[in-house]
Image (tube, rainbow, N blue to C red):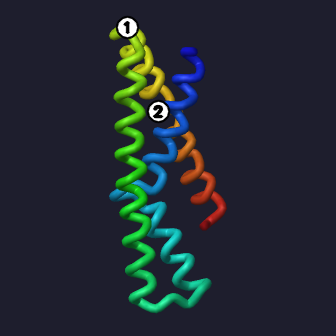
Amino acid sequence: MKKIAIVILAVFTTSAFAMGPGHRGGEKIVEHMTKKLELTETQSAQMTSVFEEQGEKMKALHDETQAKINAILTPEQQEKMAELKEDRKERWEERKEKRKQKKGERGE
């Protein structure tokens, strides 16, 4: 059961913030679509609005899921899960930095 809760948390955390408000993921997609599909300014703005709205919904779903998981776990388990989440975030940041370094080495 613990492993399932951790996997669920990981999935929702990743997806919730992938296109969440303030994240460039949605902006990059809209920029790409604007170029490739030759979207008008109106269409591009509408696409941005869709990504923002969906990001907010995903964030709300993440928060709801997190609350449900926390209701199941003991305070000690919640603390351990928070530590696991922080560890995962640190590993993600390290990988992100390595990707930046590789891009810099390749001159991208």
Quarter of image, res 77: top left
Quarter of the image for the C terminus: give it: bottom right
Per the model, the C-alpha gap separating discs 2 and 1 is: 21 Å
Rendered position, 13 above or below 37: above
- Identify the residue at image location x=58%, y=22%: 4
Q: Which residue corresponds to the image point at 59% horizontal and 86% vertical from the top-left? A: 37
Residue that badge 1 annotates: 76
Callout 2 secondary element: helix
Dot 2, how many residues are within 10 Å of its Cα: few (below 14), some (14-19), or many (20+)? Answer: few
In the picture, measured across the screen, residue 52 lies left or right of residue 40, that is left
Q: Amino acid at mark 1?
A: Glu
Q: Position of residue 25 (x, y in %)?
A: 48, 61
Give amino acid for label 2: Glu
2 or 1: mark nearer the eye: 1
In front of the other: 93 or 46 = 46
Could you tell me residue 6's position as x and y percent?
53, 24
Between 68 and 83, the one nearer to me in the picture: 68
Can you tell which mark lies on residue 90? 2
